[in-house]
Amino acid sequence: MNLSDSLPSILVVDDEVHSQAAMRRTLDEDFTVFTASDADEARALLERQAVSVILCDQRMPGLTGVAFLKEVRERWPDTVRIVISGYTDTEDIIAGINDAGIYQYILKPWVPDHLLQTVRTAAEAQTLQRSMNQLDLELRTSTPVLRQRVAHKLAQARSVFDFERIERGSNSPLNAVCSMAERVARYDLSVLVLGESGSGKELIARAIHYASPRGGGPFVVENCAAIPDTLLESELFGHKRGSFTGAYEDRPGLFQRANGGTVFLDEIGETSPAFQVRVLRVLQEGEVRPVGAARPVPVNVRVIAATHRDLEQRVHEGLFRKDLYYRLAGVSITVPPLRERAGDIAPIARRLVRDVGAELGRPGATLNDEALACLMGYPWPGNIRELRNEIARAVALSDGDEIQAQTFSLRVLHGQAGLAASGQAADQALSLPSSGTLSERLDAIETMVLRETLLRHRWNKTHAARELGLSRVGLRGKMVRFGLEG
Ligand SMILES: Nc1ncnc2c1ncn2[C@@H]1O[C@H](COP(=O)(O)OP(=O)(O)OP(=O)(O)O)[C@@H](O)[C@H]1O
């Protein structure tokens, strides 16, 4: 048997002969490489030759890469599809990602080791997918006992950080956020998660990781704001023993620890120029050089970054590198603050009472109606983290299992973030929603007005409806629609 017969096969589609040759050189050792100059040639080849991976340039004469890959998806759904493009094409590609089922896109100019790593991971993901399909088949055909055991193991592994575990109301704006996140989880794109502090950015990032083909690999969290510039190289890239005073043993850096998985770069908006340039280099080159090491080590990580800042604004102000921003923001996801999704407060609060109650040795703790109404009347400038702290305090202070409103702090009891001596928090409570479509923002404003009015009338629907010029039934309908009924 010819050795190349056992290698996975890849089809490179590019109209530029020198790019074709460069890719062939890069991939030759690991793959059986076929080449084509345009969609017609590629189609003809696919009709006679099965391939595992297709690497396609976005700009070709005739069909674009994405348009061709869409056709490939329909006719040869088993192939892994990767597209190569320049920055200016990213909008088109993101728009076509779902239609064409693109596994990954690679930005030009590409770096050989990074390209090779990406294609290797893609081929492995395909093998994994095939074994999952096989497992599925076995599940359907094996004995009931075995079937049960395998199903149980699979479910256990996935359930802990499942999107389903992110609590939300039935009409929550988080539904759209989660379904977008779940969709992008499958593709090896970088993701930028935006949202206020404590709003659940890390929770979303974890759910993306565990729903992705990298879900079996590590998820490593780094609080970027906490690394001083003097420790940057060692933190990010690791060091060899003896490379500086105090380096008593080899230590892998962040990117090596996350190899094969996902790195979560929290507070990316707070980073220094030195940090930004180093992370950019890793993303471009797909390798790191530990301090004191003779040669670089390849790393294969997916990056999910998060910030409470307006990162685009920081790019305009020259505080954040534009090239890094584009690398990180393959897809941007915005988690709305809790005050813009009042319908989430009840389900999240109930969940937190169960969790915190169990942690504090009060597994039977529950919220009574008045306590729940009180939580729903507060704007939560510190979002779910603040809600969690408030609930922990209330569980600890309650006499019995039933949590009463009196155990809440004064600011929550009075529904005013301003009582926390935070002028900014009070302003936020009254500010207009800053994200979403017009109708989503109008919904958020309507929710705020309804909640504020209900609170002033101590949840007396007749009085609130009168003030708002609604019938009692009309008000009730809106409360159901916006999840304000507890
Ligand atoms: N929808 C939710 N359901 C249940 N718990 C949630 C939800 N959203 C957030 N939490 C919990 O709230 C806390 C804060 O969430 P998380 O750490 O994800 O926020 P964050 O936006 O990453 O915060 P920061 O920007 O400060 O790092 C965590 O304990 C998280 O588990």
Image (tube, rainbow, N blue to C red):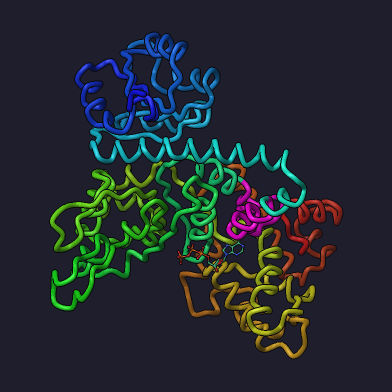
Task: Specify whether residue 435 is painted magenta.
Answer: no
Quarter that holds the N terminus:
top left
At a point 63% along the width and 80% down the height, the residue shown is: 359
Q: In which quarter of the image is residue 164?
A: bottom right
Quarter that holds the C terminus:
bottom right
Q: Give the side of residue 357 with respect to residue 100, left or right.
A: right
- Residue 370, horizontal then vertical, whole percent: 77, 75
Q: Give the side of residue 450 with respect to residue 418, left or right.
A: right
Residue 408, above or below 486: below
Q: From the viewer's side, name the closer residue of 360 and 29.
A: 29
Q: From the viewer's side, name the closer residue of 365 and 382.
A: 365
Task: Specify whether residue 154 is painted magenta.
Answer: yes
- Residue 153, horizontal then vertical, whole percent: 64, 55
Q: From the viewer's side, name the closer residue of 288 and 249.
A: 249
- Residue 354, horizontal then vertical, whole percent: 70, 73
Residue 36 shows in this picture: yes
Q: From the viewer's side, name the closer residue of 211 and 78.
A: 78
- Residue 330, horizontal then vertical, whole percent: 39, 41
At a point 24% along the width and 17% down the height, the residue shown is: 16
Residue 67 shows in this picture: no
Range shown magenta:
151-175
Q: Give the side of residue 188 with respect to residue 326, left or right.
A: right
Residue 130, above or below 473: above
